[in-house]
Image (cartoon, helix red, strand yellow):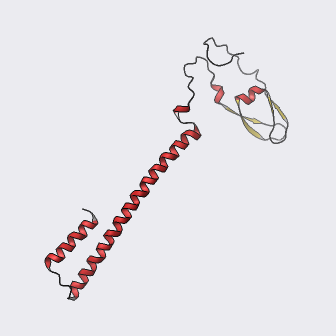
Amino acid sequence: MTVAEKVSYIKGLAEGLGVDDSTKEGKVLAAIIDVLDDIALTLGDIDEELNDVADVMTDMEESVDCLEDVVYGEDDEYDYDDDDCCCDDDFDDDMYEVTCPSCGNTITVDFDVIQAGEIPCPNCGETLEFDLSCLEDEECDCGCCHDHE
């Protein structure tokens, strides 16, 4: 039973008991019932508004989830899946921290930048060279999409 239904029930009881509005007690009871009726109507309005806000919040949460999937790459629709490749070519997605010996600035680069061999330091312009001879050159006969030199 809602608050509005309970107030209506109390109104019915007061009318059924024949509460006299001309007496002091009757006036007080009638005023209390009127206030309860106003409170019940206000609570009903607040409940409707709260439901509307909850619906909007749910929609916003779904939109944010969708944006997170796109921004952070958690959406399987855009996921590049190379699990069927036999070679351990996991370094393509790795990021590496490189510290410039001249200025001490640390930058983050991906494997493609390292594979290029050298880049200028974004802070001081010093040329940073990368030696790839330390990486093992594994041959792969799987016919996958990766270049093996």
Image height of 127 relative to 51, above or below? above
Which residue: 52% across, 42% down?
66
Image spot of residue 67 (x, y percent): 55, 43
Q: Is residue 67 above or below residue 8?
A: above
Indicate left or right for 98 with 43 as reference. right
Residue 18 place in picture, x, y as percent: 14, 80
Query: In the rendering, at what x and y percent does residue 149 appear?
Result: 72, 15
Query: Residue placed at 64% from the left, 30% from the top?
Result: 93
In the depicted view, which residue is nearer to us: 50 or 117? 50
1 and 132: which is toward the camera: 1
Q: Please tell me in which quadrant of the rendered image residue 119 appears.
A: top right
Q: Quadrant of residue 140?
A: top right
Q: Is residue 58 above or below residue 111?
A: below
Which residue sits at x=68%, y=18%?
Answer: 147
Q: Quadrant of the N terminus?
A: bottom left
Q: Is residue 134 above or below residue 109?
A: above
Taking depth in this image into account, of 124 and 70 the one nearest to the observer is 70
Q: Residue furthest left?
A: 17
